[in-house]
Image: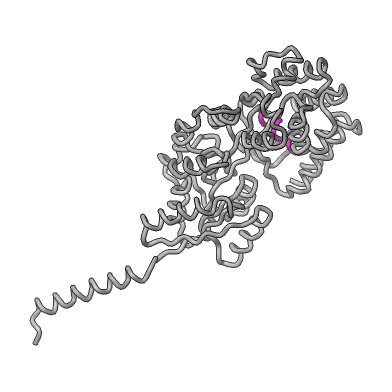
Amino acid sequence: MTSWPIRAAIATVALVLMMTVTGAAGPQTTLEFWTISLQPFFTDYVNRMISDYQRANPGVQIKWVDVQMQAIEQKLLAAIAGGVPPDVVNLNVEFTVRIAEKGALLDLDAAVPAAERAKYFDGLWAGGRFRGRSYGIPWYIAPPVLFFNSDLFKKAGLDALNPPESEDEMIEAARLIKDRTKDYGFMPLIDGTRLMHRFRENGLPMLSEDGKRAVFNSPAHVAYLERYVDLFKKDYFPDDTLRRGFTGAVERYSAGQLGMLLVGPQFLLRIKESNPEIYAKTFVAPYPMGRGKVIHAGLMALTVPRASKHQQEAVKFALYVTNDENQLEFAKLPGTVIFPSTKKAAADPFFKQKGAGPEWKARSIAADELKFGRDLTVVVSNQSELYKIFREAVESAFFGKMSPKEALDWAVREWNARL
C-alpha cells in the first residue's frame, strides 16, 4: 500500500501539472474591443497597446474590431440584441448618450473608483453624462483654436499680436476686416445644428433640466440669433457659411479670402499643403470663448455594454487604453494631432515644445484649452427629425422667411410636440 506522504506527493505533482497545462492552454477571458475608423493609420499603435496589456494580464486576450463611424451604432445595437455584445466600445458622445438612454451601457460613475475618475478633466468626464450618470470614459479630443491671416489683420489696422480673446471681440475684428479690406473676416460656426453648440457655449440651454422640454426660445436665445442674422444681412459673412459651413470656411481661408478660421489644430497641415503662402501668414490664438466659458469639442469615449459578460475586466482594459501613458503615446504619433483627456498627460512637456511653423503653438494652445473642453452635442429622441426642424428654423431666420423669434418659437413648439 502506498504511504500517505507518497500519495500526498503524487497529488501535489498532479496538481502542479494540471495548473501548468491550464496555463499553457491559453487565455481564460476574451474581451472584444471595438474602435471607430482607426485602421490602417493606427493599427500598429493599437496592436502594440493590446500586446502590452496581454503580456501584463496573461489570463486575458483582446479581440480588436475596427468599425466605420456610419455603422457603429446599428452594429452595436444588433450585437446587444443578439446576445453577443462587445466588451469595450469606442463611441462619440452622441452615440454614448443615445445608447445609454436605452439602458444598454454600464454606469461608469459607479464602476470606476473616484481616484481614477479624478485623473480626467471634469468637463470631459461629464461629456457622456445622461440623467446625472456618466457612461463613457473620455479618450481623445481635438479642441478648436483660432487661425488668423496676419496680413489681413494688418491691412485692417488690427494688431496681430493681440488677437480677439472673446466672441464679442472676434465679431468686432470681423467687422473691421470686412469694412477695411473687403474680404470677409470670419465664417461663424452657426450653420444648422452648430448653432446649438454656440448657444451652450454662451450658457444658454437647449433643454430643460429634466430633458423633457425645449427651452431655446428665451429672450437671450433670440437676441443671440438676432445678432448673427443682422451681421448676415449686412454682409459681414458670406451665405456659403450657411450652405457649406466648415468645408467652405477652410477653402476660403486657404485661398486667402478669410481673416479668421475656427478649427482643430490638425487643419494647419491641410492649409500648408493647399497654400504654403497663406500658411506662412497664419498666426494662432486660443478659441475666443463665449460667456459660458466652455468650448465645444467632439470627444471620443470608451463605453462598456451592460450585457458584457466580463464587465470588471472590460472597465480595467478601458482604463488602461485611456491611461496617461497610452494617451500620451497616441498624441505623439507622427502626423497625429489629437489631445488626451487626462490631466497628467495634457501637462506633458511634449505639448509645449517649440518648433518652426504655427502648428507647434497650436498644439500648446489646444492642450491649455482642454480644461474648458466639453462635447456639447444635444442628444434627444427622434434626433434626425428634431435636428432637421432646428436647421429649417435657423435657415428661415437667416433668409428672411421668419424673424429669429418666430423661427425659434416654431422650432420649440415642434420639438416639444415630439419630446
> What range of the chain is rendered magenta?
194-203
Whether residue 248 is visible: yes
Left or right for 171, reference 305: right
Decide which of 117, 61 is in the foreground and name it: 61
Residue projecting furthest to the top: 157
Decide which of 112, 218 is in the foreground and name it: 112
Residue 325 lies in quadrant: top left
At which x and y percent is residue 201? Answer: 66, 29
Q: Height in image: 220 above or below 90?
A: above
Residue 269 lies in quadrant: top right
Left or right for 33, reference 77: left
Residue projecting furthest to the bottom: 1
At which x and y percent is residue 321? Answer: 47, 48
Residue in view at x 28 percent, y 70 percent: 20
Quadrant location, the C terminus: top right
Residue in view at x 73 percent, y 47 percent: 383
Quadrant location, the N terminus: bottom left
Left or right for 41, reference 167: left
Q: Height in image: 242 above or below 85?
A: above
At which x and y percent is residue 34? Answer: 55, 56
- Most common SS among magenta residues: helix
Decide which of 349, 344 is in the foreground and name it: 349
Q: Height in image: 123 above or below 63?
A: above
Residue in view at x 58 percent, y 51 percent: 41
Decide which of 147, 298 is in the foreground and name it: 147
